[in-house]
Image (cartoon, rainbow, N blue to C red):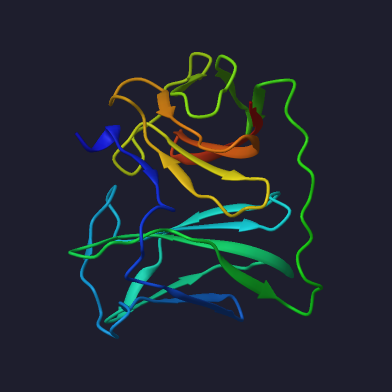
Amino acid sequence: MEHHHNHHHHQGVSEITPVVSYDQGKLTIEIKDNNGYIPELQTSHEKHMHLIIMSSDLQDYYHLHPEKHTEGVYVQKVDLPEGNYNAFVDINPKNHNYAVTPIHLKVGSVADEQINKLKVDTKLTKTVKGKTVELITDSIKVNKEVTFTFDVKGNTPEPYLGALGHVVITDEKGHQFIHVHPLSVNETTFVTQFDERGIYKMWVEFKFDGTVHAYPFVIEVL
């Protein structure tokens, strides 16, 4: 069942390297395989492409769905403030091995990115637009299955992109990309695994009253 899968998209040799560019409020993503051919993209969670963009300080987060413009070219309008970003193109190309890796984007005349030091959250309850979510988890150990349960405090998430929620996780440098979906269609529980110790930032997305809320959490893997 598709809801069970958990993308650790940084393994294996990728046969596709997307090209991402940004100009005057428009992102353009070009998809070709290493031989110059345009691959067929399969639908994954209701879309052909999920584009995750994070600012290099991991403060800003965007989950976008660029639309096909021409064969192999997808576009998305978005206003990105000046700064450095990492873009992750999450696609499922037919008959191609593909690994999601960060693509650096520089918007405006800014200095090179600086690695920030994330502070681990001591309080795992967050409120966004009036809706509160609490993360419940045991200590997070490397190379062990980790369960994240989100208490939505009596609110009912609406199905969003074919699932009850989405979790995106990256490491402190913004290099890793882990995209997790719930264990089942009716519970807000996610399972994943980390292969390196360190501090990570996660965003859990739930849709309430027709609006998607992204809740940020900073966790430590021991």
In the figure, is residue 14 to the left or right of 76?
A: left
Name the residue: 23% across, 38% down: 2
Q: Quadrant of residue 187?
A: top left
Front-lying residue, 127 or 221: 221
Front-lying residue, 8 or 70: 8
Name the residue: 54% across, 63% down: 87
Q: Position of residue 222 (x, y in %)?
A: 63, 26
- In this view, the residue farthest toward the bottom is 36
In the figure, is residue 148 to the left or right of 72?
A: right
In the figure, is residue 86 to the left or right of 154?
A: right
Name the residue: 69% across, 74% down: 107
Whether residue 81 is visible to the viewer of this picture, yes or no, is no
Front-lying residue, 67 or 113: 113
In this rendering, the count of numbered labels is 0
Q: Position of residue 59 (x, y in %)?
A: 71, 49
Front-lying residue, 87 or 33: 33
In the figure, is residue 208 to the left or right of 181?
A: right
- Picture layout, residue 138 above or below residue 87: above
Q: Position of residue 156 (x, y in %)?
A: 42, 22
- Picture layout, residue 207 above or below residue 176: above
Name the residue: 54% across, 28% down: 142
Whether residue 7 is visible to the viewer of this picture, yes or no, is yes
Q: Position of residue 49 (x, y in %)?
A: 35, 61
Q: Look at the image and tell me in which quarter the N terminus lies.
A: top left
Q: Quadrant of residue 37?
A: bottom left
